[in-house]
Image (cartoon, rainbow, N blue to C red):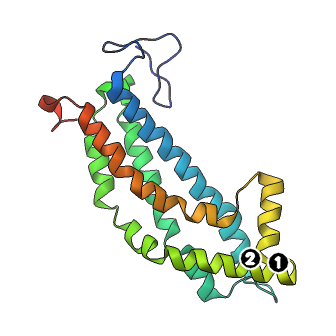
């Protein structure tokens, strides 16, 4: 059958194994890919709006943060974005040649990604400090006017963006979700093909 460019079935197509065209394994793989795309989009928004605006602020006479605070807020979020983009590319490559999700051999892509999942360790260790710093900066900016609170208000109005700490918690939540998705994937993969798939 023909498969869409984003890993889903073309309109009206069906595959052997399930009325939904891919069975439970295909559903898990699609969920892994689509949820990773959503997560990557949130990281991109964090950088595009908040990292950019705060970096620009550092060049002004009245910066919202100093350099040390800026580094505490974003630590290795760029590494997380690179990790996520690499996983997306690897998963998408599993569908090359029109391979339907339930037949996709995603094991190598997932294993390669998990070998580098340590990028989350240093981030989660610093998360509480970063969240507390956001609260401090927000409180100070509300009292003084402008600052982080103003950036958040403008981001919500112009982009429909959430507050900064909403994005900062996302990597922690994503890190918790990986084991659950992988466990479901293993459960839906036939034992005789698990090593290859």
In the figure, residue 17 lies in which quadrant? top left
Residue 99 seen in the figure: no
Image: 12 above or below 177: above
Q: Is residue 146 left or right of residue 184?
A: right
- Residue sitting at 33 percent across and 51 percent down? 179
Crowding at label 1, few (<14), some or many (≥20) Cα neighbours within 10 Å?
A: few
Q: Secondary structure at mark 2?
A: helix
Residue 59 seen in the figure: yes
**Closer to us: 125 or 196:** 125
Image location of residue 140, percent across then percent down: 77, 83
Q: How many angstroms separate mark 2 from mark 1 (CA)?
A: 6 Å
- Residue sitting at 83 percent across and 62 percent down? 154
Image location of residue 88, percent across then percent down: 44, 45
Cβ atoms at labels 2 and 1 below 8 Å apart: yes
**Closer to us: 9 or 155:** 155
Residue topped by disc 2 = 138
Q: Is residue 49 left or right of residue 95?
A: right
Q: Secondary structure at mark 1?
A: helix
Question: Which residue of the protein is positioned furthest toward the left in this rendering?
Answer: 192
Mark number displayed over residue 123:
none
Residue topped by disc 1 = 142
In the figure, residue 62 lies in which quadrant? bottom right
Q: State the quadrant of the N terminus.
A: top left
Q: State the quadrant of the C terminus.
A: top left
- Residue sitting at 31 percent across and 56 percent down? 114
Image location of residue 130, percent across then percent down: 57, 77
Question: Which residue of the protein is positioned furthest toward the right in this rendering?
Answer: 145
Image: 63 above or below 105: below
- Residue sitting at 53 percent across and 50 percent down? 39
Q: Is residue 127 left or right of residue 41?
A: left
């Amino acid at each position: 059958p023909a498969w869409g460019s984003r890993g889903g079935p073309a309109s009206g197509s069906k595959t052997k194994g399930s009325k939904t065209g891919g069975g439970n394994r295909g559903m898990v793989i699609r969920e892994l890919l689509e949820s990773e795309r959503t997560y990557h989009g949130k990281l991109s928004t964090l950088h595009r709006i908040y990292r950019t605006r705060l970096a620009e602020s550092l060049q002004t006479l009245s910066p919202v943060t100093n350099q040390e605070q800026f580094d505490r807020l974003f630590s290795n979020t760029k590494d997380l974005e690179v990790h996520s983009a690499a996983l997306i590319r690897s998963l998408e490559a599993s569908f090359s040649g029109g391979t339907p999700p339930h037949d996709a051999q995603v094991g190598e892509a997932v294993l390669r990604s998990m070998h580098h999942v340590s990028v989350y360790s240093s981030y989660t260790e610093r998360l509480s400090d970063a969240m507390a710093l956001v609260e401090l900066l927000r409180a100070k900016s509300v009292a003084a006017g402008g600052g982080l609170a103003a950036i958040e208000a403008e981001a919500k109005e112009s982009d429909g963006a959430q507050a900064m700490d909403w994005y900062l918690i996302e990597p922690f939540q994503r890190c918790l979700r990986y084991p659950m998705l992988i466990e479901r994937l293993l459960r839906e993969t036939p034992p005789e093909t698990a090593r290859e798939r």
